Image (cartoon, rainbow, N blue to C red):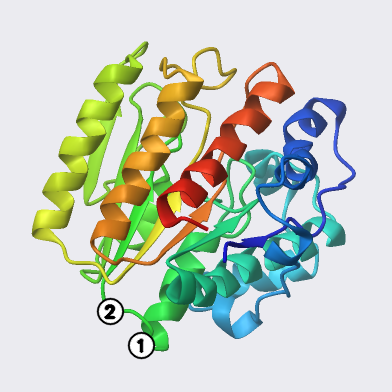
């Protein structure tokens, strides 16, 4: 059974230029149900994560100021959203959803999060629409509770997850892999365990070949017992914030490839949405729904 964490609070008081990409959190579940790919019983509404869990990853001072709506205007400009209680609640629920997905992935092989993939957040700061790093928090929870010993984070968003890289740079139990646009945001890249920066205009065929070779290399050297997959669709040709050229079909081939590698090795995986900023909302939704199609096809759910 495919279990899906739904975005609990997709309606936010945002400027109009932010509202467009946020719509996907409403449209993806609706499309999945419309096509009959899943039923309503496949969805769960995440509970907020605990403060204790968040503090395994994030600095206490940063979290205290966030909860009390005391982050500065400068900090929030870097994040890109206005600071509100609704936004903070949503962030804690997103992290909660990723944590809850871990139990479903362990049971069924894969679990999905409609939101998540907030990989730019570091221990004491947010950035790039990310206040908390949901995958990092969930990974640290798994390690702290001994539900996993070796964790692989596959980040295929077009932007490097510099927050995740920094958080785990000295942790041998977490392997961070980021394949991203070399000249895309963020301007300053941190060092993942494996970084592949693609040149502007990199083709889908080259992308898939490089990815397959990278997964072969990683899984030969590192033996994870759990994985997270950030499946950003901002790799698509024409994405407003991406600079590489992967077609929508090649993007689905990417998802199938990742799931195939993990399933063959019996590695449970939690998949989060990551970014997607194509000019046509239908393209964003279709590409994200393809990730669910790939999971359903691979795990025969």
Res. 146 mark = 1
Residue at 15 percent of width and 37 percent of height: 213
In the rendered image, which quarter is residue 131 located in?
bottom right
Q: Position of residue 108 (x, y in %)?
A: 47, 70
Q: Is residue 44 above or below residue 129?
A: below
Q: Is residue 297 visible?
A: yes
Q: Is residue 124 visible?
A: no
Judging from the image, what secondary structure is the residue with disc 1 in? loop
What is the C-alpha distance between the residues marked 2 and 1? 7 Å
Residue most extreme to the bottom: 145
In the rendered image, which quarter is residue 179 located in?
top left
Estimate how packed mark 1 is, as few (under 14), some (14 to 19) or many (20 or more) residues with alpha carbons within 10 Å.
few
In this view of the protein, which residue sits in the foreground, 146 or 295?
295
In the image: residue 151, left or right of residue 133: left
In the image: residue 156, left or right of residue 63: left
Q: Are marks 2 and 1 in contact (CB under 8 Å)?
A: yes
């Amino acid at each position: 059974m495919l279990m899906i964490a739904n975005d609990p609070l997709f309606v936010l008081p945002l400027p109009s230029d932010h509202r467009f990409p946020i719509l996907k959190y409403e449209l993806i579940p609706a499309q999945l149900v419309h096509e009959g790919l899943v039923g309503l019983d496949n969805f769960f509404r995440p509970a907020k994560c605990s403060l204790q869990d968040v503090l395994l990853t994030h600095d206490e001072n940063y979290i205290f100021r966030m909860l009390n709506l005391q982050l500065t205007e400068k900090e929030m400009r870097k994040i890109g959203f206005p600071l509100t209680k609704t936004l903070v609640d949503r962030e804690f629920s997103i992290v909660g959803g990723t944590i809850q997905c871990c139990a479903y992935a362990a049971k069924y092989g894969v679990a999905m999060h409609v939101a998540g993939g907030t990989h730019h957040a570091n221990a004491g700061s947010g950035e790039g629409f990310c206040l908390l790093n949901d995958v990092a928090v969930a990974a640290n929870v798994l390690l702290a509770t001994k539900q996993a010993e070796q964790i692989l984070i596959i980040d295929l968003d077009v932007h490097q997850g510099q927050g995740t890289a920094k958080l785990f740079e000295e942790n041998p139990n977490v392997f961070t892999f980021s394949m991203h646009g070399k000249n895309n945001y963020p301007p300053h890249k941190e060092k993942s365990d494996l970084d592949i920066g693609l040149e502007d205009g990199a083709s889908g065929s080259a992308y898939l070949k490089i990815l397959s070779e990278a997964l072969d290399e990683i899984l030969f050297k590192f033996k994870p017992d759990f994985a997270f997959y950030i499946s950003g669709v901002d790799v698509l040709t024409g994405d407003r914030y991406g600079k590489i050229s992967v077609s929508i079909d090649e993007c689905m081939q990417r998802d199938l490839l990742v799931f195939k590698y993990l399933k063959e090795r019996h590695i449970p995986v939690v998949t989060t949405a990551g970014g997607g900023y194509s000019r046509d909302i239908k393209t964003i939704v279709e590409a994200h729904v393809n990730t669910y199609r790939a999971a359903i096809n691979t795990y025969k759910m």
